[in-house]
Image (cartoon, coloured by chain):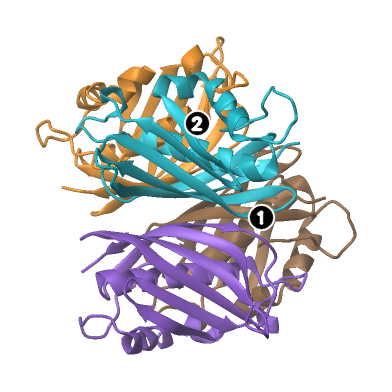
Chain colours: A orange, B cyan, C brown, D purple
Amino acid sequence: MPAETPTGPPAELDPALAQKILDAQPFSRLLGARITAFGAGAATLELDIREEHRQQNGYVHGGVLSYAADNALTFAAGAALGPAVLTAGFSIQYVRPAVGAVLRARASVVHAGRRQAVVRCDLLTVDAAGAETLCAVAQGTVLSSG
Amino acid sequence: MPAETPTGPPAELDPALAQKILDAQPFSRLLGARITAFGAGAATLELDIREEHRQQNGYVHGGVLSYAADNALTFAAGAALGPAVLTAGFSIQYVRPAVGAVLRARASVVHAGRRQAVVRCDLLTVDAAGAETLCAVAQGTVLSSG
Amino acid sequence: MPAETPTGPPAELDPALAQKILDAQPFSRLLGARITAFGAGAATLELDIREEHRQQNGYVHGGVLSYAADNALTFAAGAALGPAVLTAGFSIQYVRPAVGAVLRARASVVHAGRRQAVVRCDLLTVDAAGAETLCAVAQGTVLSSG
Amino acid sequence: MPAETPTGPPAELDPALAQKILDAQPFSRLLGARITAFGAGAATLELDIREEHRQQNGYVHGGVLSYAADNALTFAAGAALGPAVLTAGFSIQYVRPAVGAVLRARASVVHAGRRQAVVRCDLLTVDAAGAETLCAVAQGTVLSSG
């Protein structure tokens, strides 16, 4: 998610502002993403898994997982660096095919300096009973652009 | 894109079969992706950039770029390894904000063995005059699952 | 660390065999590496930081950190997959300049299947009093070559 | 190679200064590295493959490849951004076991902005007749710290 400079006021990010920025992303609205936890260098992004998120075998498409990783990493960094951030890049390793009711991307900052944050993210599917299964892991670097 | 085992016959992949597999991915249909080149260890995937692909500042969302990288890498590997492949993971570095008419992901295999292929991908935007601008680069490893 | 097929017997890896494989790596002997924990999908590799490990500003060279990540990831995977493994690749993000008495690479498998393991690694420096400071994080995929 | 702020004058990097910085790295001296090309957003680093660079099966250790990638990426970025750079991280995928007389890391900047450069690197072994064989590929992001 490059050039994540929000157009809102240069305030500290809080959960309400984070959700507002997410809602200002047409692609996140298309996928149905929501922020379910935010603050203290961490962010959780979720979406209800729908037919349109799948690949040809019925699993959640890797591109949905990588979207969720990219966005959760960036928001977690925003929780540490403030709203003006720019994601330099990330790496994702797939663990197993993703099936379930909800996709959950749980990201937390492992270190934030003045200029950059390094962030890790777990990608999990959640079944109807609430049980989590890890389907991918990611890590990346996010720069402060303020 | 984990578990990319197509349900079709275990034939060699050709451009028509590659497009057919892409069309069997609901998420790729949602994003409007198409395969515009395929073969000899390379694949190009494109989509017309639409409002719904954007983030809050009007740029193409990083998640769209990472989707295109994931899928182009996997198809390029399929052009070398055959249709039964499984993407282990990839890394993406963003170069500049992505704006333009078309997003083009051009992937080519740098080496394919019996069990895995290593693939690089350039992510480019194309303007109305056909000029390309690099917006991200990716590389990853795809395993043969046959 | 590609082609990490040990020449020893095809036994399960245990701490003694892991240390024996490490000792059979001339590069690990050159750097002075040792395995300080091993088993249950995890491995810790350490080395005493010496003048020859440094870059031009006196910090531990990034290449020493990436060596430690590569090797710790591979050994942790060996603790889950058995001795015949082959590292597909990894990603490393640097967190802060590395200074201290000891470099510690603590790797643990986040998921191991039949064919591959996905592993994360923390790179820490340890001062004379035993206090740890995170200096880099890594993650990678290791394949079973058995 | 984090915190690659050279201690020399804040001049533009040229091949002689690049070699001087390399020579100021004890770890690069330990490994016998040299810069064989430098300039215009590119750098080539080489070392003669010695017994002490190997792992247990006689191949060049993955840690030597990742050292070469890290350092070549950073120097290539320095050729574009100037001497004050700091490597954020990189990803490396191994292609095949590395054997040969010389290890060559050829890095080139794919894009350099004001604040960061994105760099790719090919890792090759060179046999006695001068023939190159690709053994790994890498890509990373380097920040300007000036």
Query: Could you give the CA–CA distance between mark 2 and mark 1, rounded to whole angstroms?
Result: 22 Å
Residue A83: percent from the left, percent from the top?
Answer: 20, 38
Q: Quadrant of residue D94?
A: bottom right
The type of residue carrying mark 2 is: Leu
Q: Is residue A73 rendered to the left or right of residue D123?
A: left
Q: Which residue is mark 1?
A: C87
Identify which residue, D51 or C105, lies in the foreground.
Answer: D51
- Is D53 situated left or right of D41 in this image? right
Q: Position of residue A111 (x, y in %)?
A: 36, 50
Q: In the image, is residue C12 above or below residue C20?
A: above
Callout 2: 10 Å neighbours few (<14), some, many (20+)?
many
Decide which of C18, B51 is in the foreground and name it: B51
Query: Above or below — where is D31 with respect to A57?
Result: below
- Residue C146 x %, y %: 82, 50
Q: Chain of mark 1?
A: C
Which of labels 2 and 1 is toward the front? Answer: 1
Q: Quadrant of residue B19?
A: top right
Q: Is residue C64 in view from this perspective? A: no
Q: Which residue: 76% across, 38% down?
A: C114
Letter of the chain that mark 2 sits on in the rendering = A
Residue position marked by numbered label 2 in the rendering: A123
Check disc 1 and give the amino acid type. Thr
